[in-house]
Image (cartoon, rainbow, N blue to C red):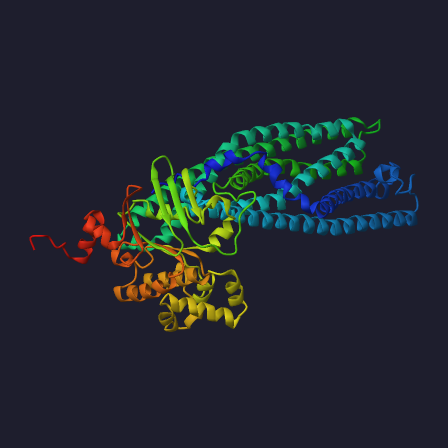
Amino acid sequence: MSDEHGGFEGVRENLDRHPMVQLFGYATPYWLRLTVGVLASFLTRFARLVPPIIVAAAIDRVVLNNSEPGLLTQAGILPPGEIASEAAKVSFLQRLVVIAAVAYLVRSVTRFASRYLLQSTAQKVQRDLRNDTYDHLQHLSMGFFADHQTGGMMSILNSDINRLESFLNTEFRQFIRVVATVGGIAIVLSTYSVKLALIALAPVPIIGLASWLFLSWIEPRYRSIRQTVARLNTRLENNLSGAAVIKAFDRYDFERERVESQSQTYHDEKVAALRIRRGFFAALRLLTGVVFVVILYVAGMDFITSAENEAILSAGAFTAFFLYLRRLYSPMRRVGKSANKYQLAKSSAERVFGLLGQAPEVTEPDDPFEPERIDGAVAFDDVTFAYDDDPVVRDVSLDVSAGDTVGLAGPTGAGKSTLLKLVPRFHDPNEGTVSVDGRDVRGYGLQSLRDHVAVVEQQPYLFSGTVAENVAYGDREVLDGEEDGDEDARERVREAARAAEADAFIEDLPEGYDTQIGERGIKLSGGQRQRVAIARALLNDPEVIIFDEATSDVDTETEERIQESLDRLVEDRTAFVIAHRLSTIRDADRIVVMDEGRVAERGTHDELLVEGGDYADLWYAQADERPVSADD
């Protein structure tokens, strides 16, 4: 019960480009709204730079009656010269008020536009990415699902994609904020004092270098944290799904210890990263604080020592300078947080796009054969298949004519189920060929082939919903009709249920066919679930049908009724029946006995009894009989 596959560590090997480049590639279809949002965001940041300039002009020109022109005067927005009269000061102040009002109006409108456009784009990218990832997962081969656990897949579809949306939603805007704010303030400060501007901007390259080093250090740690989260999710999902087993064997303490162990690992990794992260941010605050103190000292000394000469800054400019410093260092300190968020997003992007880069083992042919109907002749020619290194099916050759019923028997692990999974191409053989109507199944369109081949498994999966919806799932048109309340679709569902001997128990349910059966059909018994699954398989009227221990969970009487129905239903179909109870396949046209992946015996029921091999021994054991000997 290892969790080694829970972290999806191997999918990163599928990346062919930088994962963040691929992420932004998902935003390119929305380039227009993204461009407008970016421009609006820049305008918002520039509008925020106007109020300190207005304050500087008010102090110098209105309060101190200074003729210092200032930036707005140099730009031609305010009149130059000394303002002597009270009326002139009132007029000047009113103009400042109008400028401030326009700046705040622009800021409000552009802030709304930028946030709406950028955040809605992030939501669209999230939607598209989740849809594509889910669709890609569904098209991966069954071998992938055998090697990877559900908890890890859910972690990618939910946690990782949500993290990418959050990064686009917040950190992309923060990047614009840093560029616009730092760039704009640098230009404004340099117009007041180049010397003080250089002091104020000195931490920028230091913060950039420190952030790069921080990224290099934190990257492997966040990667490990994401893997740990996936393994923890997998463990929790397994335990919640297996609650009945845990209760039956009283393994509360055992499972609690396993969850606690993985929770502790996650805690330790998270706290270690948190310690360094908080220290990094504290160092950034200390650095910006030092610069603030240095500028205060240099600018203050200039005022003190320039009694007879003109100071570097006017009183208004001095005030504006410190207002800008406060705004400058906030986004600069945010660089460290953005670097942290970037690394988290990059780790998630590696898993998402690594998964999207995972190629399915079973692929659609370039020019697929898609017949409307097939006869149903199936042939296995020297077929060998292995999940890993050890073959599960070895050199199997078998010809089945259209309309024949073939029973498969043999011990658990003999390769019966695996062999039949090659017919609908859940897997492809490593050696040999599987053909339907004389054509290699690899030449068929995948969906077309599977429309003609139905599978009823030993432990059928039912979806949360009504009985009717689960039966209707076997045919796309009927499913659509069932959702729309089509009476013809409901009648087809009833016919399939009657054929599977399921109609009687369905009618006895509280709401009949509209009864909600719960997650995985938990409200139904094992036998009831199997009969619903049989009805679902029959609904599509397949030419080939595979029953994988499909009557193992029903009582003998129900099995006999199902068997009578199946005898009629498979009369014109090719049927493969895997059975533990040999009575189920007694009347098959041919019985194939498998052992260790090979065909050990084949023939009719009577022929195999005469041979006196493994089938005969198993039959007499199950029938509680013994063969009649010559001595008798």
Q: Position of residue 266 (x, y in %)?
A: 43, 40
Q: Position of residue 469 (x, y in %)?
A: 47, 64
Please identify the quadrant where the N terminus is shown.
top left
The image shows residue 82, relative to residue 295, as above or below, that is below
Task: Evaluate whether residue 541 shows in this view.
Answer: yes
Which sits in the foreground, 162 or 298? Answer: 162
Left or right placement of residue 269 versus residue 135 in this view: left
Horizontal relation, residue 36 to residue 129: left or right: right
Give residue 45's position: percent from left, percent from top. Answer: 73, 43
Above or below, 464 against 298 in this view is below
Quadrant housing residue 321: top right
Q: Quadrant of residue 336?
A: top right
Q: Is residue 36 left or right of residue 170?
A: right
On screen, residue 565 above or below 549: below
Q: Give the camera-side residue of 441 and 296.
A: 441
Q: Residue 529 versus residue 29: which sits nearer the camera?
A: 529
Q: Nearer the viewer, residue 464 or 330?
A: 464
Residue 377 screen position, x and y as percent: 41, 51
Res 148 visible:
no
Quick one: quadrant of the C terminus? Answer: bottom left
Q: Residue furthest left?
A: 631
Side (left or right) of 179 relative to 464: right
- The count of marks equals 0
